[in-house]
Image (cartoon, rainbow, N blue to C red):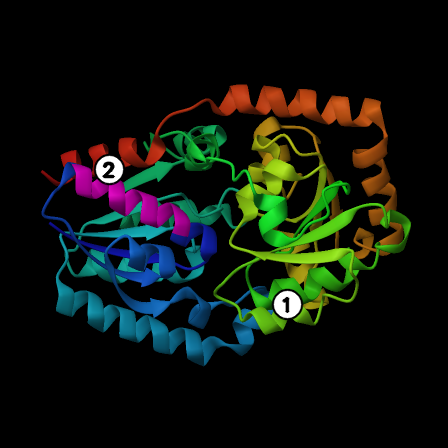
Amino acid sequence: MKYYLIAGERSGDFHAANLMRALRTEDAAAEFRCWGGDMMEAAGGKLVHHYQEMAIMGFLEAATSILKFRGFLKECQRDLLAYKPDVLILVDYAGFNLRVAKFAKQHGIKVFYYISPKIWAWNQGRVHTVKAVVDKMFVILPFEQEFYQRFGYDVDYIGNPTVDAVAEHEASTDFRERNRIPANKPIIAVLPGSRKQEIESMLYVMLSVLPPFLNYQFVIAAVSNLDRNYYQNFQRSENITIVSDQTYDLLRHADGAMVTSGTATLETALFDVPQVVCYSTSIVSYTIAKALIKVPYISLVNLVAGKEVVKELIQGEFNSRNLVQELKNILENPEYIARQKADYAELREKLGRSNAAQKAAKLMVGYLQ
């Protein structure tokens, strides 16, 4: 069968690539065409556009990029009709993907959604659009199934693919040596995100806390789809190391972490690393988001746990003073660390282990047959 997949950012690329490999085990004749990234291409997809070209964050940024957005949408629609897939598989990325889903539905193309867009966080009215244009929804967070059921929409809960990815990761034994990280220094992992726009909002403040922690090595999790020279602008001290595409190995070796909100917060918890969650955007985007957000937290850790497990420093609270205080808590306060790790253990138990990608692939192929 022919599969057309769309993922709009790095974690979507990762999860879509795993799904593609799982689909091939269920459908040996599977063909893939996609909008995504390097990992989807490596998994056998014919890449139409890289997600980097489409990276738009925040309400203000989206408004100023509307012509670019429309151009990509029109191109995607033309390409979808030309390819004539058996199914369109969408991965998160609601703003773009729900528009493509509506178009596909109008033209008789079956639509599956793998990893629900976060409509439960804001604009919950979009659930009616989802019901109208998505044939099958596959969700990865326990509360998402309950959310959709409130609107009379049955979805498949497949477990969380991040749990599977972390469990299957084989730690590198030479991580420090390979990256020239001093053996005698504990590591603070710095996870600033994967898009230039968010990195530039986060990384200068994250690294401003260096002076009180000179006995630690700050290790920035870089991504290879951004030029290595770009990150060199942030390497202002011998206490700062940059590693590319080694986030899981970094978390295996880290004593604490500063993490930009997103999937990385869940990954950090699953690696049992004490963390502080950070987030900042333009004042216009923040003001709009604050008015629309319907959930009490922004990190997946706290959302799944249903309580504050990790401290969230958002917008005005994301500053050097608060960051220093919270780093001291997660690095030097034994009671604080023990409490966070106990909550992590409950989180892991709640999420369980499911082989999510394979489960989703089996369900998808079954639905298509």
Residue 273: in magenta span? no
Q: Nearer the viewer, residue 330 or 149?
A: 330
Kind of residue sitting beneath label 2:
Ala
- Residue located at (73% from left, 45% from top): 188
Q: Is residue 249 above or below residue 340?
A: below
Tell me if residue 22 is in the magenta stretch: yes
| Quadrant of the image occupied by residue 76 | bottom left
Left/right of residue 39 with respect to residue 105 in the rendered view? right
Q: Position of residue 118 (x, y in %)?
A: 49, 46
Measured from the top left, where is residue 102 in percent x and y?
28, 58
Q: Secondary structure at mark 1?
A: helix
Residue tagged 2: 361
Dominant SS type (magenta): helix
Task: Specify whether 320 is left or right of 10.
Answer: right
Residue 206 occupies quadrant: bottom right
Residues drawn in magenta: 14-25
Indicate the amino acid at tag 1: Tyr
Q: Position of residue 183 (x, y in %)?
A: 72, 42
Residue 196 is marked as: none
Kindly identify which residue carries mark 1. Answer: 231
